[in-house]
Amino acid sequence: MTSPGYQHVAVIGAGYVGLTTAAGLAHLGHEVRCSDCDTARIKLLRSGRISILEDDLEDLIRRGCAAGRLAFGADNTWAVEDAEFIFLCLPTPEGPDGAPDMSFVEAVAAEIGPHLRDESIVVNKSTVPVGTADVVGGLLGRSDVRIASNPEFLREGSAVHDFLHPHRIVIGALDEETAVRVSRLFAGIDAPVIFTNPPTAETIKYASNAFLATKVSFVNSVAALCEAVGADVHQVCVGMGLDPRIGSSYLRPGPGWGGSCFPKDSAALVQIAEEAGYDFSLLKGVIAVNQEQYDRVVRKAARLAGGSLSGVRVALWGVTFKARTDDLRSSPALEVAWRLREAGATVTAYDPTLCSPLDGIGVAGDAYAACEGASVIVLATEWEEFRSLDFDKVGNAMARRAIVDSRNLLDAAALRRAGFEYEGIGIL
């Protein structure tokens, strides 16, 4: 049964954000219709399954459907009929110039405008350039329909938890009534609510992701410094993170940042700044440091392989952009893999979620098989299973016992005792 204060909600787009939003709002008691143009995806969702790896999401969807609060379809006009709130959860991929491709958002806005009920509210959930609320309003062509911005702050792998237990809920609207109406959808969630205007809400999203990317690039630069001066980045980060002004989150060195958000959102913010007449040189530096980090991992592999990767077999452990997801979009692991190939290496990868071939990269059925004849392993994604491998078996399969642990996941001392040459990121 729906709660006494439930609303009719439409969610357009059934990707990570759309599915989590639809399932989360249904869980809160609302009646939700979710639509997507991918008919195969809709068919799968109607059977109670999802095509992505995301903790608790499939269960939440099944419960919403079983309770009659969640339905899926491939028709946007079906989704929006009688809906008081319409959430746009559509892709905004990076275009050739770094600006977001807004074609999906613009096409849907133009499509649904004539079919919206009177006085409904269209909510931009997608990450969109500053000023998109006005653009969407114009495409809808409805003076009675209001526009709001409600950016998402979901982490892949913990999206359901982040939706139900957010650090904050940001609502951008031009009038208080619209903002309050949107905020009531989240009744029952204990989190600070920030009411602001749409441009500010849109900027909060971009600025948040850019700052997190900055922290990762910063700590990777500190790790490089630690290697140069003989310091241990783990202890440096502990010492830094205990300062509450800094905090410990995102102070973990690695192969670089990636995923579906950080790369495109950082590039978009640089583009947005340029269009506004501001040279965001700091963020450009953050992006440049990230590109350099991929190359630093490759140089480490070359050193352990004897100075060159030409003709060398390399085992790549992990291909997703982080553990607990099957997302390969802008994965640092794949960025490293392409560079290994460019340096002349033959790369064989293993990832627990990988079940399809990769262009130019061999795919093994387990971590041991990936190591057959390899002169060096590059651990690129922090899957826990890599900790518990039999490293004598690993070493016996290799042509040379060497490993680049770009996530600092493994026990360096134990590996060295087992005869491995070991290099982490910023550790002794």
Image (cartoon, rainbow, N blue to C red):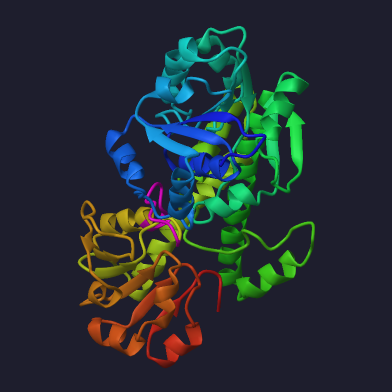
* Residue at x 38% of width, y 55% of height: 326
Residue extending furthest right? 244
Residue 34 in view here: yes
Q: Nearer the viewer, residue 366 or 16?
A: 16
Above or below 258: residue 348: below
* Residue at x 41% of width, y 47% of height: 330
Above or below 86: residue 288: below
Measuring from the top left, give residue 181's x and y in whole percent. 70, 27
* Residue at x 60% of width, y 51% of height: 162
Q: Nearer the viewer, residue 307 or 158?
A: 158
**In which quadrant will I find the N terminus?**
top right
**In which quadrant will I find the C terminus?**
bottom right
Q: Which residues are magenta?
A: 323-333
Q: Quadrant of residue 29?
A: top right
Q: Quadrant of residue 117?
A: top right
Q: Is residue 327 magenta?
A: yes
Residue extending furthest front? 1
Measuring from the top left, give residue 406's x and y in whole percent. 46, 67
Q: Is residue 161 left or right of residue 58?
A: right
Measuring from the top left, give residue 336's x and y in whole percent. 37, 57
Measuring from the top left, give residue 81's x and y in whole percent. 48, 20
Above or below 279: residue 343: below
Q: Is residue 348 magenta?
A: no
Principal secondary structure, stretch drawn in magenta:
loop
Q: Is residue 6 left or right of residue 299?
A: right
Q: Is residue 45 left or right of residue 206?
A: left
Residue 200 in view here: no
